[in-house]
Image: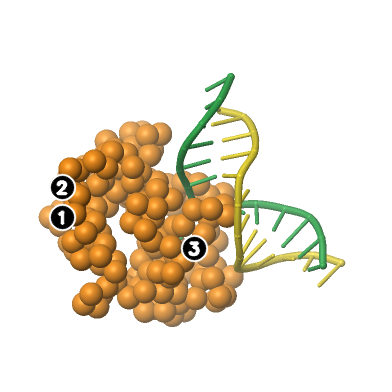
Chain colours: A orange, B green, C yellow
Amino acid sequence: MIVRHDEGSTRVRLVETEAYGGEDDPASHAFRGRTARNDAMFGPAGHLYVYRIYGLHWCMNVVTQRSDLASAVLLRGAEPLVGSDDPRGVVPAGALAGPGRLTRHLGVTGDDDGRDCCVPGARVTFEMSSREADVRRSGRVGISRARERLSRYYLAGSPGVSTTLRSPHPEDLA
DNA sequence: ACATGGATCGCCT
DNA sequence: GGCGATCCATGTA
């Protein structure tokens, strides 16, 4: 999957995602019901849910399910693709590894919370790419509750995945 | 009102 | 591998 930001100005290849929500997920921001922060998670699929983490980073999710079964996919890492306005390709390979770095480089902030990614001219959109080889599945990271759920997907060995997470753990599924 | 604890990262040793 | 930066939604009173 590829994220295209500002129609061709920045394009990245997603290499790490994590799913949250649905029924009975205590690690989901929507677990305790609808609030001002998680409002976008209860809205239409295909919109962004952006929130601040640790007071200084932004994390971006794509909403995947409507209303009461609020669900979203956290975008955790990507590889830079050479953008049309960045012919030098100067972005280091690991610059988008980690959810905070990804939003920083895409320029995604709280202003993008709730934005629809599926309309013409959207600031952030997605396009499918051919099926990736070497996609692994593992438990979720960086959380305390329900971390054992195998809802994290990543491209094994990719520099777009945090260094300590890019090598498959023995328990990870292929 | 006030306390708490994160879906993190960069820099340090 | 440890720590500090720095915010705010939420829980408790």
> What residue sits right under mark 2 in the picture?
A87
Disc 1 with disc 3 on a shared chain: yes
Q: Kindly check if marks 2 and 1 are in contact, taking CB atoms under 8 A apart as contact.
A: yes
Circle 2: element type = loop
Is residue A111 in sight in this rendering? Answer: yes
Q: Label 2 crowding class (10 Å Cα cut-off): few <14, some 14-19, many 20+? A: few
Q: Position of residue A101 (x, y in %)?
A: 40, 48
Residue drawn 43% across the image and 62% down it? A109
> What residue sits right under mark 1 in the picture?
A84
* Chain that bears disc 3: A
Cα–Cα gap, marks 2 and 3: 31 Å
Q: Amino acid at mark 1?
A: Ser
> What residue sits right under mark 3 in the picture?
A51
Q: Quadrant of the N terminus of chain A?
A: bottom left
Q: Nearer the viewer, mark 2 or mark 3?
A: 2
Q: Label 1 crowding class (10 Å Cα cut-off): few <14, some 14-19, many 20+? A: few
Q: Position of residue A145 (x, y in %)?
A: 56, 53
Circle 1: element type = loop
Residue drawn 27% across the image and 39% down it? A93
Cα–Cα gap, marks 2 and 1: 6 Å
Q: Amino acid at mark 2?
A: Pro
User: Sequence-wise, which precedes: disc 1 or disc 3?
Assistant: 3
Q: Amino acid at mark 3?
A: Tyr
Is residue A45 in sight in this rendering? Answer: no
Circle 3: element type = strand
Tag of residue A172: none
Q: Label 3 crowding class (10 Å Cα cut-off): few <14, some 14-19, many 20+? A: some
User: Sequence-wise, which precedes: disc 2 or disc 3?
Assistant: 3
